[in-house]
Image (spheres, grey):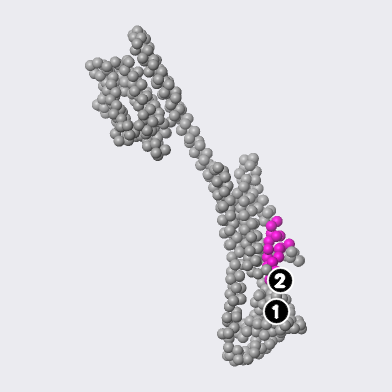
Amino acid sequence: MNLLRKRHSSLVLNILIAIVITLTVNFSYLLSIIVDQRETTGGPQQEPEVVVVQARPEVRGELHLSKDGYGYILCDTLINTPHGERHLDSIFVSNRKARWYNLCDGDQIVCNFFPPRGDANPQLDKVLVQNGNEIPAPVIYDRPNRNQDMAVQIFYYFALTFILLSIMTVKLNMHNPNKRTRYKQRALAVIAVTVACYFFAPFTNWMTGKVMMIFQMKPMMMDWMVILKCIVVLVVAILYGRIYTLLFEQRKILSENELLRSENLQNQYNMLMGQISPHFFFNSLNSLSMLVRGKDEQKALEYIDQLSYTFRYIIQNGQNTKSKLQDEMEFARAYGELFKVRYADKLFFDVDVDERYNEWLLPALTLQPLIGNAVKHNTITRKHPFHISIRTEGSTLVVSNLKSPKLEPEPSTGIGLKNLSSRWRLIAGTDIEIIDNEKEFIVKLPLQDPSEE
């Protein structure tokens, strides 16, 4: 599903970029259409503004056309204008008029014209004689209109741009590990496609007004405007392909880093859990050994039952990164019973947990090292019973006890608290708070709202 979504988004992006590039390379053509339409609609409206007292004069001259279809009829005569007599040396011929009358470079023309305005050249009105032949009416050729020309141009450059972008965003050699080689292959492919498509590029023959393809030109010539457009499309496609490749590689690197980070966290968690289980196992065997040596069978059996439950919980939940507070409290009660067997009427658990937080989460086996360390490092006698408090203060679980140090302190490696602190940072992303003063030892554990998972 994710792959389909990525392909769909890439396709839409290629289409949007192809549209933008198509409109960009054809901007001049769009502009010429607007100008031509203004000439067509504006000419007749401008004619009445010219005050003509007499019929438009006829002149004779030779036509000179440029490659763009515009030209001038060179003549040498005097004409009368509203501002007086003026020497006339040339008449402007628009490409529309040249196509309309099928005029060619070098034609001998007899025509009349629109009188000039100010210092501007007069414009051709009608062609009366062309190379000695009278022309009673304009020759209109069967050619596509400008809108059809534009549609052909847009379709061609859109198709070319989309094909090139698609090639640059597809891996041509999936088994080649060299990313630079793959990019060169795609670049060479789009160059070859552009060269091949150039011969099918449409262009407008200004002399005939017809839309043709490059391979239809006789003799074969290079149309520099078409070449320029194809080069622009090619360069944009190659640059876009490079940017796309870099973004794809960056996204892949981020994904791999995230995967490695998750695997690293899991490995660290498994290592920490591996340290907890043997520690708890050896302490439990020592306690059971003491009961057996004391020949207290009933307490030994009860101890074995509770020990079985606690080990079952560790096996079932040891690989879980998080547990519900309710489950942890049930385990803490069973774990506490193991110590109560040893410290009958000497060890007490003061539990005050708000039921509203029963479903809230914390790292699995959080309470086990706290209870074990409290029992390990404090004196527990009938004269000085020991209390462990487990309570909630808002959304924080607090485990505390008054300190009653043993006369001969047991050696401590600090593995339990270090593991707990490390697991909390890895799993919950927060730190626990440890308060160790002369009178009291307190650990504050922030619970996690399950709705924020």
Residue that carries the numbered disc 1 in the rendered image: 138
The reply to whether residue 269 is in sight is yes
Residue 361 placed where, x, y %? 38, 33
User: Is 291 displayed left or right of 70 in the figure?
Assistant: left
What segment carries the magenta color? 196-215
Q: Amino acid at mark 2?
A: Asp
Q: Quadrant of the N terminus?
A: top right
Q: For residue 216: magenta?
A: no
- Distance CA(mark 2)–CA(mark 1): 13 Å
Q: Residue at x 76, y 66 (%)?
A: 219
Horizontal and vertical percent position of residue 259: 51, 37
Q: Which corner quadrant holds the C terminus?
A: top left
**What residue is at 59 percent from the left and 57 percent from the top?**
18
**Residue 7 drawn at (x, y percent):** 58, 47
**Residue located 69% across and 74% down the image:** 99
Q: Nearer the viewer, residue 382 or 143?
A: 143
Look at 55% across and 49% down and name the residue there.
9
Sort mark 1 into few (<14), some (14-19) or many (20+) by Cα contacts within 10 Å. Answer: some
Picture quadrant where residue 16 is located: bottom right
Q: How many C-alpha atoms fall within 10 Å of the one at disc 2: few (<14), some, or many (≥20)?
A: few
Q: Can residue 244 be seen here?
A: no
Disc 2: which residue: 142
Residue 265, above or below 291:
below
Q: Amino acid at mark 1?
A: Pro
Q: For numbered disc 2, what is the local secondary structure?
A: loop
